[in-house]
Amino acid sequence: MDFTFTEEQQAAAEAAKGVFAGVAPDAVPSPALTPGAVAESYDRALWARLADADLLSLLLDAEYGGAGLDAIALCLVLRESARVLARVPLLESSAAAAAVQAYGGGAAKAALLAGAGRGETVLTVAAHGRTGHDPAELAVTARRDGAAWVLDGVQTAVPWAYDADVTVVPAHTGTGRTVLALVPRGHQGAVLAEQFSTSGERLGELRLDSARLAARDVIDAEGAWEWLRDLLATGTCALALGLGERVLRMTGEYTSKREQFGFPIATFQAVAVQAADRYIDLRAMEATLWQAAWRIASGAPGALPAAGDVAVAKIWAAEGVRRVVQTAQHLHGGFGADVDYPLHRYHAWAKHLELSLGPAAAHEDALGDLLAAHPLA
């Protein structure tokens, strides 16, 4: 296990820093806290810049215009995006395209991948199940009907559902298999109902009522959903890490300037200890993130499946980012609750990331099941 980044991975991170350098999260009002405001679409200008920098095709092979990099490179870019709360479907579109490339048929690859790498085709994933607390693959059924597939069910909280050209929907066949259905926006039998996240972003409840798809639009490959789910969860951990690092820096800058009794409050032991604890959280989040990303990227065998490393990373990400933003709110005092100060937006996004794809408790349960099924020698 080597956590040294390659030149290509470092180049991707540097390119991301350049693209995100001009994004100012404090200049964007939070729809959740601004009366009448709704974030109806992603930042299309930023999306175009990411495409121009070849950051939307990181995981794609050269034949589709990609760089052929791995989950580690994607997580490095996602980490930078979260520092500025970039409103783009970078994780969902990149992960979905990677899954199509790894498991999809030739027709699906030809139809989607080159366009996804150029930013012309946007993909998203329905990964939260019917309620957000149940397995996503059990929320929708898929049955054969001649040469076609028929889908029925509901997926909640689909990110960028109103903007994505295609939504990847996991569905169970009733025989223990999970397929990935590529559902175009506006497809007959697929209806969206508006929802909103804690950060004010518009989500979609996807209702499928006898939606028919051709066989070429359904990926029926063993392990496809599990791989995509692990990549999404690991990418979410990268977002939580980048957000937490930015919040801790904001807190350090504020406490170094805010004075009480003639001294910066950062010099007070109680403040310094809280900040140090949160720094330790971030380092643990970072170590477990790279462990999970490395397992996905390398396919390296271990005592547990890669899902075990992903569960550990998500536990630390969910708990760690919550503690970081709560401490930041406390140490900022009244400024932490001021909607004209950017910290409130980071807090709202942190809560969304904490719960996205399952809170810490859900992943602790999953890890327990894995340990029970794979006893360590």
Image: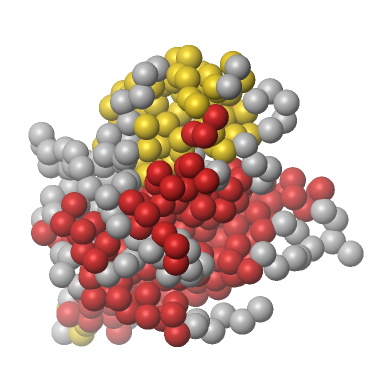
Residue 26 image offset from top left, x and y in percent: 15, 61
Q: Residue at x 24, y 76 (%)?
A: 18
Q: Residue at x 62, y 37 (%)?
A: 220
Q: Quadrant of residue 259?
A: bottom left
Residue 188 image offset from top left, x and y in percent: 37, 19
The front one of 289 and 333 is 289
Residue 233 in sight from this viewpoint: no
The front one of 265 and 14 is 14
Left or right: 193, with 140 as reference point? left
Left or right: 22, with 313 as reference point? left
Residue found at the far right of this picture? 377
Q: Residue at x 63, y 69 (%)?
A: 298
Residue 70 in sight from this viewpoint: yes
Q: Residue at x 61, y 82 (%)?
A: 2
Position of 40 relative to 350 (above/below): above
Quarter occupied by the N terminus = bottom right
Q: Quadrant of residue 201?
A: top left
Left or right: 350, with 237 as reference point? left
The front one of 201 and 108 is 108
Left or right: 255, with 154 as reference point? left
Residue 82 image offset from top left, x and y in percent: 32, 62
